[in-house]
């Protein structure tokens, strides 16, 4: 008889927590959206879209790992589900920077194009690499190169945030400026968890390692989607309150 694994149970439980957390975030952003001045509502709409996509993602993930707590029930993780989520949600997270900067015209468009192209390169290379690692059941050259390319793209995003975005943020009202400076940290620190998780699977492909990686990704996702969304939301909420008082 196969024994129930604590790690499998914990992962199944965390997928539920992820699903409920993302669904709650979506509801919150949608309900609170109407309390904002119309010019700021797009920030709440984008935040709700991000958590909604993730709620759907976690709904499927929890089914993919079943409910038995048996290792044999999980052969491989449905990598596609995560990467489809990331391909949709990471651009939406990055869009909040130009949105809060309210950059108009060429400068705004250029920043958006740079952020989104680097982001798509990062996610697509990660997907190609992880698929090759999964197929080979461990380390591959392609997996290593995908990691390198993806990491360079991520560092470029950080560079843009700490140069162009930081400069433009200085001209924004205090609550927005503060939020933008804090939001950079999510991309620098919060996003770092993903390449670390990827590097660990590249080096060691056992099921336990995959489960721990999933657990860590879940916590990271909640922080980077709900937490990040709240930081941006509170800034536009403060702006709406200020302009209503005047
Ligand atoms: C990969 C592998 C290649 C190297 C790098 C990666 C980074 C992934 C990131 C994902 C972020 C996801 C978020 C999801 C939603 O909250 C693709 C793992 C750098 C940063 C923020």
Image (tube, grey):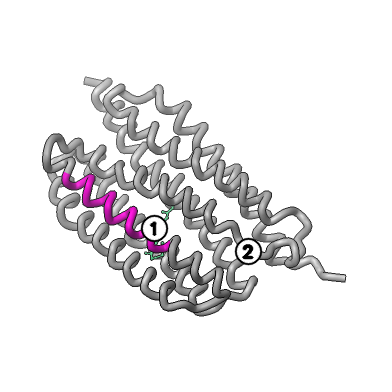
Q: Residue at x 45, y 73 (%)?
A: 199
Q: Tell me which segment is drawn in magenta.
A: 110-126
Q: Is residue 114 magenta?
A: yes
Give the percent coordinates (x, y) of residue 120: 34, 53
Give the percent coordinates (x, y) of residue 240: 29, 27
Residue holding disc 1: 124
- The quadrant holding residue 45 is top left
Residues 25 and 76: in front is: 76
The numbered disc on residue 200 is none
* Label 1 element class: helix
* Label 2 element class: loop
Seen in the image, is 176 located left or right of residue 132? left
Give the percent coordinates (x, y) of residue 8: 70, 63
Seen in the image, is 204 located left or right of residue 198? right
**Marks 1/2: CA distance?**
20 Å
Residue holding disc 2: 76
């Amino acid at each position: 008889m196969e024994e129930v694994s604590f790690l499998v149970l914990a992962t199944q439980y965390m997928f539920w927590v992820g699903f409920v957390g993302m669904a709650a975030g979506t509801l919150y952003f949608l309900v609170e959206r109407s309390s904002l001045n119309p010019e700021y509502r797009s920030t709440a709409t984008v935040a709700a879209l991000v958590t909604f996509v993730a709620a759907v993602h976690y709904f499927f993930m929890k089914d993919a790992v079943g409910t038995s707590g048996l290792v044999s029930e999980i052969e491989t993780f449905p990598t596609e589900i995560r990467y489809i989520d990331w391909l949709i949600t990471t651009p939406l997270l990055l869009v909040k920077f130009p949105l809060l900067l309210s950059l108009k015209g060429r400068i705004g468009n250029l920043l958006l194009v740079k952020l989104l192209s680097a982001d798509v390169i990062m996610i697509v290379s990660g997907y190609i690499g992880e698929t090759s690692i999964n197929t080979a059941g461990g380390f591959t050259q392609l997996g290593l190169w995908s990691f390198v390319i993806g990491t360079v793209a991520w560092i470029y995003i950080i560079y843009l945030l700490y140069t162009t975005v930081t400069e433009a943020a200085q001209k924004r009202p205090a609550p927005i400026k503060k939020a933008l400076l804090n939001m950079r940290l999510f991309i620098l620190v919060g996003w770092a968890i993903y390449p670390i998780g990827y590097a660990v699977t590249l080096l060691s492909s056992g099921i336990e390692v995959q489960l721990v990686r999933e657990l860590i990704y879940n916590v990271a996702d909640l922080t980077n989607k709900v937490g990040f969304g709240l930081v941006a939301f509170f800034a536009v909420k403060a702006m709406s309150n200020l302009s209503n008082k005047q």
